Image (cartoon, helix red, strand yellow):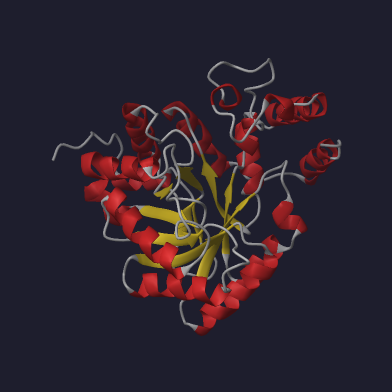
Amino acid sequence: MEHWNIYVADQERYDKMAYNRVGRSGLMFPAVSLGFWHNFGSKDNYDNMRAMCRTAFDHGITQFDLANNYGPVYGSAEESLGRLMKDDFAPYRDELLITTKAGYDMWKGPYGDHGSRKYLMASIDQSLKRMKLDYVDIFYHHRMDPDTPLEETMTALVDIVRSGKALYIGISNYNKEYTKKAADFLREQHCPVIVNQRRYSIFDRTIEEDGVKAYCKEAGIGIIAFSPLAQGMLTDKYLHGIPSDSRIARDHRFLHAQDLTEERLDQIRRLNDLAGQRGQTLAQMALSWVLKDDEVCSVLIGASKPAQIAENISVTQNTYFSQEELDMIEDICKIKN
């Protein structure tokens, strides 16, 4: 098999990245991880995907994060990962953390959604087949399901780990109440949940407000943050209009032009000025802010080109904020959203 020329020696690659303990587990996450939520679907360019993953790995990003329905179309991001494993990454499997999830709609009918044992068991098998893997490092339940007994969902996750199809259990989008119930149950099964994946950014403080951030630290559960750039708003991308290649222009599922109110743009401008004073881009400062304390062990970044990944690696070297800077950020965010 022909492999690409990794331009750094192994240890130098890892020296580029900080690695953080995931809760009280033995696992460590790279401070920055690569998400396949966007730009890895069937409509995206494979050569660009390949270049992004090579760049990420060469800079010490060892975690690729997926879900069964990432695309579009559903399943296509996992299929892209399977192709990448075959073409480049199979020899490095033991150096990688590959994670996937199930919990949102995936196939038609009553068995392709939510948190039933039937859905989760079928989903892990489908995901492994698409990704050409024997196991994933973490299998997440993607969202809370109040209509399915939590014990059923958690027992399915335990059995998936004990079958060898996953090494660890994760949860995603779980609030404090569900996180605590899941953690208590899994602790009794001697198969603990190690991580909760939640949305978190300067513009979205929900995990502070609902108590998840504090509870996870107390319970020894790691947090990995997604959407740390608020779907691209915490960048300088929209300061001078909406670029034709931006997410707002190309993909209307998650961010819309009307989200960029004058109040929001004023916040972005002021944050951008502060980032400049720190010697960072706004995106770099937003990622650094999420990583500023030890409650968050990794931030998930999306990317549309390799240069974005390389640019954001440097945040691991600059996560300190003075109290004055933190107060300025809080003052900026007091503007009504």
| 133 to the left or right of 305 | left
Pick the residue in front: 36 or 28. Answer: 36
Pick the residue in front: 283 or 11. Answer: 283
| 80 to the left or right of 202 | left
Pick the residue in front: 90 or 43. Answer: 43
Q: In the picture shown, does residue 187 fall above or below 196?
A: below
Q: Position of residue 321 (x, y in %)?
A: 71, 44
Q: In the picture shown, does residue 103 fall above or below 178?
A: above
Can residue 140 be seen here? yes
Q: In the picture shown, does residue 163 fall above or below 308?
A: below
Quadrant into which the C terminus falls? top right
Quarter assignment of residue 294: bottom right
Q: Give the tally of numbered discs.
A: 0
Q: Position of residue 160 (x, y in %)?
A: 38, 70
Quarter assignment of residue 265: top right
Rendered residue at 58%/34% (across/down): 253
Rendered residue at 69%/24% (across/down): 257
